[in-house]
């Protein structure tokens, strides 16, 4: 005779992870072993430091709060279908928090001894359990909990050894770096390169790379007679050095070389010129390892003569993005590759626009990408956010110079529109005279924002301080960056206003873990993943990285990873924030591709239970991160 109770249990479990990864027969066998427990409101299921039970639990009806007893702080709220009490399954230690019913609750107790073989034999089940357990320690892939079920590391940032994905494998580079100083002569450099049989030599100052000299430089500058053989490295070197981290992939390396028309890349400890060089990569190294990759798209973009020629290539970039997401390629690599491709499209639009001008630029200039594009996080087709900064000129030439760059910016903005970037509704574009300024004017603007930080000034600084160079003179951008850091350091109260602005983003969930939806307007009853989840993380990362005066890192996950290095005591939290941001960005990108929009507003009814669980899990870091910046910058006592 069929056990109707266990049959009902099976019907319930099959709808929720990780049980939905099991075969129907396995769920039926498991359901026969499950105990059903009724608990009244405020009943303690297990206490903090209590010895672990022989079962873990699933909420059938009701809700269970997971509480830090010492601080009486609710860490999580489990509702229908959620699992908790996984510690005895993963780690042989007492419970680290209290589990208490929030209302009348019915629980299913899953015997660990019976269930563990399922977790060990079924990778999807094991992955989900490890994620669920580790998420209560903030980082869903906490190093201390990886491999507890399998005896090996598990993580979403792992690339399988697939020959079809050779282009996103880490590239092999030479660790034997040949170096010289800026006063070394060309003759000595040539002798050293010949002796060491290398095609490039790094120029160092205080152990940091300031320039590079290649065989090509010696041919073009010394052998031609342009400079004598006694010329020093500081004169003939190429500077600044284009640097990347050692995690560089084959695709990234080739795209970087093609984009900048160079044959060597310098690899440094953190990917910026501000840390020690650890390797050098040549075009030959890349060609040896190269397979099919997005570099063909770069070639196609660079061959484009008109704006309209680039638009179909951008469509191909979106297909590539979809393919990477479908193959579950790590978001770190996906965003870098797509950003590089988008940057090349923008650069080619600017190159075409320059040809439309009657004369070359009167002075050096820099085209800046702002906001999400400046952070290398704009993967979908969204609107434009950009600015232009040009060298200072005399007062009598200012009007003529500004007119030239406004005309150029108008061409570029139209070109970007033609290839798929909508115009910014707020006109935050370089064709707007407010966003096309000389270096001196930009400094005056930044000084005003920092010393008169009203609501609008803080909002503008949030957008503008996340800039990156798309095209033009690096030295102009570096000059402006130095000024921003110096001015903020001279006006530390500005941090308080930055933090206050960062705390304005609305919470993603209510007390009972319900998603907080838009209450009115065109997106009523939709969840705003940008404002409620991504922005709080991006805003906090910006404040913290600026407070450390770290330059050259604008990407939010990379900022958190750098912060983990700078603040070891908060390492786990910052790495969790980096993971959460990448997961949220991936989720938004998938939604955008699915619905052919920006992915900002999500209809929750379209999500599965598993998708909602994963989405909620990424929210756990936001509260603690906001508490850190509130306390550190003493916001509550000043404002």
Image (spheres, rainbow, N blue to C red):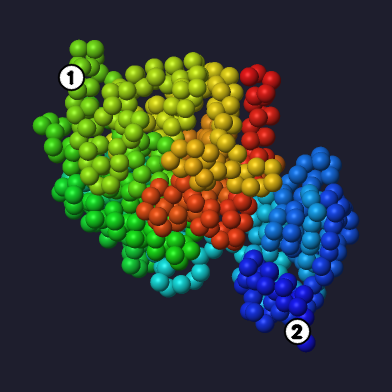
- For this rendering, which residue is in front, 585 or 259? 585
Decide: is 406 above or below 305: above
Q: Earlier in the sequence, mark 1 or mark 2?
A: 2
Pick the quarter of the image with the N terminus.
bottom right
Q: Residue 315 sits in which quadrant?
A: bottom left
Q: Is residue 572 visible?
A: no
Please tell me how crowded label 1 is: few (under 14), some (14-19), or many (20+) other residues with Cα within 10 Å. Answer: few
| Picture residue at 44% right of the left edge, 27% below the top | 460
Badge 1 vs badge 2, beta-carbon distance below 8 Å: no
Residue 575 percent coordinates (x, y) = 61, 48
Residue 196 image label: none
Residue 190 percent coordinates (x, y) = 32, 49
Residue 2 image label: 2
Decide: is 226 above or below 175: above
Instruction: Identify the residue position indicated by label 1 in the image.
Output: 400
Pick the quarter of the image with the C terminus.
top right
| Picture residue at 44% right of the left edge, 16% below the top | 448
- In the figure, is residue 536 to the left or right of 480? right
Residue 228 percent coordinates (x, y) = 23, 39
Q: Nearer the viewer, mark 1 or mark 2?
A: 2
Q: CA distance from mark 1 to mark 2?
A: 88 Å
- In the figure, is residue 465 to the left or right of 101? left
Furthest residue toward left: 358
Secondary structure type for disc 1: helix
Furthest residue toward top: 396
| Picture residue at 56% right of the left edge, 61% below the top | 608
């Amino acid at each position: 005779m069929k056990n109707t109770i266990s049959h009902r249990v099976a019907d319930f479990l099959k709808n929720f992870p990780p049980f939905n990864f099991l075969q129907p027969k396995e769920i039926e066998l498991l359901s026969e072993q499950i105990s059903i427990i009724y608990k009244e409101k405020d009943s303690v299921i297990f206490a903090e430091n209590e010895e672990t039970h022989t079962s873990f639990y699933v909420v059938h009806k009701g809700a269970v709060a997971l509480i830090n007893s010492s601080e009486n702080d609710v860490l999580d709220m489990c509702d229908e279908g959620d699992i908790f009490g996984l510690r005895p399954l993963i780690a042989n230690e007492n419970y680290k928090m209290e589990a208490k019913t929030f209302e009348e609750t019915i629980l299913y107790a899953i015997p660990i001894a019976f269930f563990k073989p399922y977790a060990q034999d079924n990778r999807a089940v094991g992955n989900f359990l490890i994620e669920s357990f580790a998420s209560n320690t903030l980082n869903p892939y906490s190093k201390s909990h990886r491999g507890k079920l399998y005896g090996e590391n598990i993580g979403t940032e792992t690339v399988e050894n697939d020959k079809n994905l050779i282009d996103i494998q880490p590239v092999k580079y030479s660790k034997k770096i040949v170096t010289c100083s800026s006063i070394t002569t060309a003759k000595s450099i040539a002798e050293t390169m010949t002796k060491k049989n290398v095609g490039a030599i790094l120029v160092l100052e205080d152990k940091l790379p300031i320039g590079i000299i290649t065989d090509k430089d010696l041919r073009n500058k010394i052998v031609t007679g342009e400079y004598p053989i006694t010329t020093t490295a500081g004169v003939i070197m190429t500077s600044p050095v284009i640097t990347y981290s050692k995690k560089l992939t084959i695709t990234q390396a080739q795209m970087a070389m093609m984009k900048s028309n160079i044959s060597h890349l310098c690899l440094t400890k953190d990917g910026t010129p501000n840390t020690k060089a650890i390797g050098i990569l040549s075009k030959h190294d890349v060609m040896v390892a190269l397979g099919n990759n997005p570099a063909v798209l770069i070639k196609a973009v660079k061959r484009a003569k008109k704006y309209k020629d680039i638009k179909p290539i951008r469509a191909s970039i979106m297909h590539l993005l979809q393919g990477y997401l479908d193959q579950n390629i790590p978001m770190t690599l996906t965003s870098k590759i797509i950003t590089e491709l988008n940057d090349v499209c923008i650069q080619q639009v600017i190159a075409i626009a320059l040809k439309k001008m009657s004369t070359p630029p009167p002075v050096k200039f820099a085209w800046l990408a702002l906001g999400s594009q400046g952070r290398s996080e704009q993967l979908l087709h969204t609107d434009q956010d950009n600015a232009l900064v040009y060298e200072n000129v005399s007062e009598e030439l200012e009007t003529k110079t500004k007119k030239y760059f406004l005309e150029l910016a108008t061409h570029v903005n139209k070109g970007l529109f033609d290839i798929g970037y909508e115009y910014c509704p707020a006109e935050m574009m370089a064709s707007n005279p407010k966003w096309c300024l000389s270096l001196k004017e930009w400094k005056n603007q930044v000084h005003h924002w920092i010393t008169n930080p009203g609501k609008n000034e803080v909002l503008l600084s949030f957008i503008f301080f996340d800039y990156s160079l798309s095209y033009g003179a690096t030295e102009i951008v570096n000059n402006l960056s130095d000024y921003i850091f110096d001015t903020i350091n001279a006006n530390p109260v500005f941090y308080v206003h930055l933090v206050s602005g960062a705390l304005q983003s609305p919470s993603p969930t209510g007390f009972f873990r319900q998603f907080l939806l838009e209450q009115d307007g065109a997106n009523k009853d939709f969840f705003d993943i940008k404002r409620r989840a991504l922005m709080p993380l991006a805003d906090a990362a910006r404040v913290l990285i600026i407070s450390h005066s770290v330059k050259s890192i604008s990407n939010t996950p990379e900022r958190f990873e750098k912060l983990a290095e700078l603040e070891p005591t908060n390492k786990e939290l910052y790495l969790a924030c980096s993971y959460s941001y990448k997961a949220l960005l991936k989720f938004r990108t998938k939604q955008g591709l699915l619905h052919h929009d920006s992915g900002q507003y999500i209809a929750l009814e379209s999500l599965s239970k598993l998708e909602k669980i994963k989405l909620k899990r990424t929210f756990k870091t936001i509260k603690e991160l906001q508490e850190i910046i509130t306390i550190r910058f003493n916001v509550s006592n000043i404002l």
